Image (cartoon, rainbow, N blue to C red):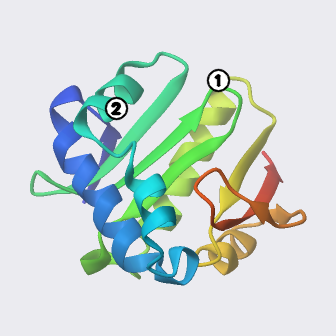
Amino acid sequence: MEIRDAKLEDAAAICEVLRQSVTNLCIGDHKNDPAILGAWLGNKTPETLKGWIADPSRQMLVVTEEEDVLAVGGVLDTGEITLNYVLPSVRMRGISKVMVEALESRAKERGAKTCTLNSTGTARRFYLAMGYAEQEPKTGMFGAIVYPMSKLL
């Protein structure tokens, strides 16, 4: 298993990780509501991913195993973690923990003092265990409830 910077040629594989993870692991959040699921997946396209990968203010990382992309994470220079998704088939292998640690390290290297994120209900306990403090839940941009969290680096 290797963690590395995402490349433009990873965009389709990253898109597949995002779509499988949201669809299969976040059912408790989207509740199979077509409107929420459609909004959540709407920007998960290879073209959008290429833009995120090329954005100099965003760090995009992937976890690979034998060239297969297993997970994707993203963090802005401000310290906001925007992505942390794994393929359902590799869940519970510690990949998300390694990814968050790498994202926090990248944010710190770029001058961030705090990492922030909007957790799903599915990932909420995971982030609390990683030392994140939560604020009041709110309705996120895709229509599902999110849990804003932060952690001092």
- Helix, strand, or loop for circle 1? loop
Q: Which residue is at 36% across, 27% downward?
A: 53
> Residue 113 at x, y = what percent?
81, 35
Q: Which residue is at 60% across, 41% downward?
A: 105
Judging by the rendered image, the residue that carries numbered circle 1 is 110
* Distance between the alpha carbons at the discs numbered 1 and 2: 23 Å
Q: Residues within 10 Å of mark 2 (few under 14, many from 20)?
A: few
Which kind of residue does numbered mark 1 sit on?
Arg
Front in this rendered view, residue 57 or 39? 39
Q: Is residue 70 visible?
A: no
> Residue 14 at x, y = what percent?
27, 48
Which quadrant holds residue 48?
A: top left
> In the figure, is residue 124 to the left or right of 43?
right
The image quadrant where one finds the C terminus is top right
- Helix, strand, or loop for circle 2? helix
> Residue 133 at x, y = what percent?
85, 64
> In the figure, is residue 97 to the left or right of 79?
left
Q: Is residue 101 visible?
A: yes
Q: Earlier in the sequence, mark 1 or mark 2?
A: 2
Q: Which residue is at 35% across, 78% downward?
A: 24
Judging by the rendered image, the residue that carries numbered circle 2 is 48
